[in-house]
Image (cartoon, rainbow, N blue to C red):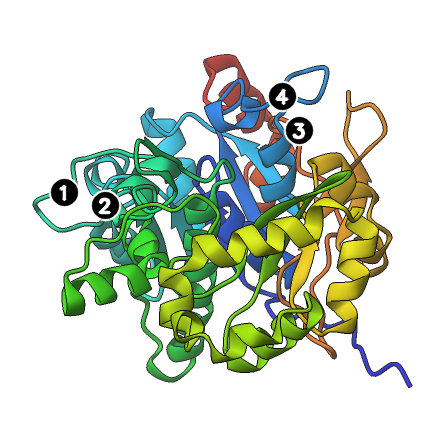
Amino acid sequence: MDTRTTHKVLEGIRVLDFGRYIAGPFCAALLADFGADVIRIDRVGGSEDRFVMPVTETGEGAFFLQVNRNKRSLTLDIDRPEGREVVRRLLLETDVVVANMPPRTLANLGLDYATLSAIKPDIILTASSAFGSHEDASHRVGFDGVGQAMSGAVYMSGMPDSPTKAMVPTVDFSTALSCALGTVVALYERRNSGRGQVVEASLLQTALNLASGALIEESALGINRRATGNRSPIAGPSDIFRVSDGWIIVQVIGQPLFKRWARLIGAPELLEDPRFANDLRRGENGELLSAMMAKWCESRTREAALEELEEARIPAGPVYSPREALDDTTIRASGAFTWLGYPGLAGEAPLVSPPAYLSRTPPSIAARSPTIGEHTDEILREAGYGQDQISAFREMGVV
């Protein structure tokens, strides 16, 4: 029996989204997926993050389509007093403000917590930035790659003479997930206290969390690990291997998996070799293990190698191109994508479904990302402005 309900968990919660790029907007999108009414505040003419990695005729970008679904768009010049007054009126009916900007910029725009809470005491400000709000770094700006690099993760990736960052914005998306969790927790706490608060996150703090294992190990042991490409330095064989028609990843971690792997490649004598006695030793001698696995892989197709590895219950998978990931039948069958059109887009875009699913009150991607100012008149009318006032705003360039 289908026990799902049409009720959305965050129905009735209003969010003003001043976020840009990924960390702020994706946090707000996740809240919208669970029913929050999210209003994206766009610059007049469109904000800069709208046009990164363009895929539509009018220049909307791939990430924009992903992280702004389920939102409405209001264009507004918040540098002008008339624009500030519109924000002030909207705040009276708002629960959460999302803004990923340096603290000084928040204050200059009147989006700091002191200003917001003076207007609405139970407001929640979800504010992420590159480095946090502490005095030493609050003035600095940065992107995902800066957080990756400063955490130690880039140093540990690639090869010693070629540090390598991830080409997908892992820190941005992880920060957004943390902010969404913090926002929901703050809303939950507000039910009892009736008070708002600041939910704060930074790209650097997120990146440090992701790199925490390497940081703790270095602090405890001082071993100064160097980059080893795709090969794990703490277990083995754990690496990316070439097969006859592509690449696969294999991750052998822990004694049970090592036993199964040794039998799979026909080398049970490795189980008695002191060089491979435990994960740490296998990591230290990983080049030898990777060479053995590479030899096993080179004569097999990707499909054949993965089939044998699956039968042996060893974690492995194909190294996909983006096209192959889109076409994989298992990924598609899992409901990984919600396909939606957009004005000026050839066909439909595969928006990736929310990363968490609730069985009874699931999230949903019900609406595409908005065009520039698509809902401006609608939102202003809801706020009590008449058509003459809205027309005057347009003539003045406020909206």
Residues tagged 2 and 1 counted as in contact (Cβ below 8 A) = yes
Q: In the image, 346: left or right of 370?
A: right
Q: Which residue is mark 2?
A: 131
Rendering coords of residue 204 (x, y %): 28, 49
In this view, the residue in front, 49 or 93, is: 49
* Residues at marks 2 and 1, CA–CA distance in whole angstroms: 6 Å
Going from N to C along the chain, the mark reached first, 3 or 4, is: 4
Q: Earlier in the sequence, mark 4 or mark 1?
A: 4
Question: Which residue: 60% across, 46% down?
Answer: 382
3D distance between C-alphas at marks 4 and 1: 32 Å
For the residues bearing labels 4 and 1, Cβ distance under 8 angstroms: no
Mark 4, Cα crowd under 10 Å, few <14 / some 14-19 / many 20+, is some
**C-alpha span from label 3 to label 1:** 35 Å
Q: What residue did someone put label 4 on?
A: 54
Q: Which residue is mark 1?
A: 137
Name the quarter where the N terminus is drawn.
bottom right
Task: Specify which label sits upstream in the sequence, 3 or 1.
Answer: 1
What secondary structure is marked by label 1?
A: loop
Give the amino acid at mark 2: Phe
Q: Which residue is mark 3?
A: 371
Check disc 3 and give the amino acid type.
Thr
x, y percentage for residue 272? 48, 80
Provide residue 93's location: percent of width, then percent of height.
Answer: 48, 56
